[in-house]
C-alpha cells in the first residue's frame, strides 16, 4: 500500500526493516515521548524500532504506516480498532526536525480518505494531553471536534495529566 498525500514529497507506506535506524533516530526524543500514550519507549532503542516494525507489518484490521518525506521515514500514523469496533483510534507523531511542514495534517487527511473508502470505521477518536497545542491544531484542520464536556485524566510516567478526547465522523 502506498497512499499519496496533499504534500508533494510526503507519502504513507508500510514500515520496512530498513527504516530501523531512521525510526530509532526520530522516535528517541523526549519531546515526542511526552505527548504519546504510556508505553511509548524512552529511550527508544533499535530493539524498540525492530519490534515496532514487526508489529506494523503484522497488523490485520489495524493499520500502521510510515510517514515518508523526501524518501525517508520521518514519522508514524496509524489507526486501531477500539472496544467499539466501528470506532477507530488514530495516533501519529513526526520527527522533530520536520515539525511545522504540514506533514501530520497531510498524513492525517490521506489516512482519513483511505479509511472513508474502506468503510471499516464510522468514527475516529484520539486523546490529546492538555498543552499539546500543535496536535490540537492538526486535529482541528482535519475536522475533529473536542469533547470539552468530559475531560479525561490519564497517567503518564506516574504523572497525572488532563486530556481531551477528539472525535470525527467518517460517514455522514
Ligand atoms: C503534533 C505533531 C504530530 C504535529 O506535526 P506537524 O507535522 O508539525 O503538524 P502540521 O505542520 O501539520 O500542523 C501543525 C499546526 O500546529 C501549529 N502550531 C505548532 N506549534 C504551535 C503552537 N505552539 N501554538 C499554536 N499553534 C502551533 C502550526 O502552526 C500548524 O498549524 P497551521 O497549519 O494552522 O499553521 C508533532 O508536533 C509531533 O509529533 N508532536 C509530538 C507527538 C504528538 O504530539 N503526537 C500526537 C499525540 S495526540
Image (cartoon, rainbow, N blue to C red):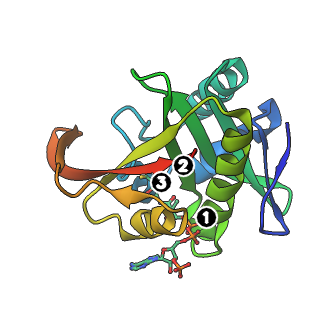
Q: Which residue is label 3 attached to? A: 29
Residue name at image x 55 percent, y 62 percent: 142
Q: Residues within 10 Å of mark 3 (few under 14, many from 20)?
A: some
Q: Which residue is mark 1?
A: 105
Tell whether label 2 touches label 1 (CB within 8 Å): no
The image shows residue 6, relative to residue 86, as above or below, that is below
Residue 120 vertical placement versus 103 (above, below) = above
- Tell me the mark number nearer the camera, choosing from 1 and 2: 1
**Marks 2 and 3, how far apart at CA:** 14 Å
N-terminal of the pair, mark 2 or mark 3, is 3
Farthest residue in the front direction? 172
Residue that appears at 38% across and 31% down: 39
Q: Quadrant of the N terminus?
A: top right
Q: Nearer the viewer, residue 167 or 61?
A: 167
Q: Position of residue 41 (x, y in %)?
A: 44, 36
Q: Is residue 66 left or right of residue 32?
A: right
For label 2, the residue is 92
44 left or right of 156 in image: right
Between the C-alphas of marks 3 and 1, the distance is: 21 Å
- Residue 63 position, x and y percent, is 65, 31
Q: Is mark 2 within 8 Å of ligand 1?
A: yes
Q: Which mark is residue 25?
A: none
Amino acid at each position: 500500500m502506498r497512499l499519496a498525500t496533499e504534500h508533494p514529497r510526503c507519502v504513507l507506506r508500510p514500515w520496512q526493516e530498513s527504516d530501523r535506524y531512521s525510526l530509532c533516530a526520530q522516535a528517541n526524543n523526549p519531546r515526542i515521548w511526552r505527548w504519546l500514550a504510556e508505553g511509548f519507549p524512552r529511550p527508544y532503542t533499535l530493539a524498540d524500532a525492530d519490534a515496532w516494525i514487526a508489529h506494523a507489518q503484522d497488523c490485520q484490521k489495524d493499520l500502521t504506516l510510515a510517514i515518508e518525506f523526501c524518501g525517508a521515514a520521518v514519522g508514524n500514523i496509524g489507526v486501531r480498532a477500539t472496544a467499539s469496533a466501528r470506532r477507530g483510534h488514530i495516533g501519529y507523531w513526526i520527527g522533530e526536525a520536520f515539525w511545522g511542514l504540514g506533514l501530520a495534517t497531510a498524513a492525517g487527511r490521506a489516512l482519513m480518505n483511505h479509511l472513508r473508502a474502506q468503510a471499516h470505521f464510522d468514527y475516529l477518536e484520539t486523546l490529546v494531553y492538555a498543552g499539546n497545542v500543535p496536535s490540537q491544531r492538526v486535529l482541528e484542520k482535519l475536522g475533529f471536534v473536542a469533547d470539552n464536556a468530559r475531560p479525561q485524566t490519564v497517567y503518564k510516567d506516574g504523572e497525572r495529566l488532563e486530556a481531551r478526547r477528539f472525535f470525527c465522523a467518517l460517514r455522514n
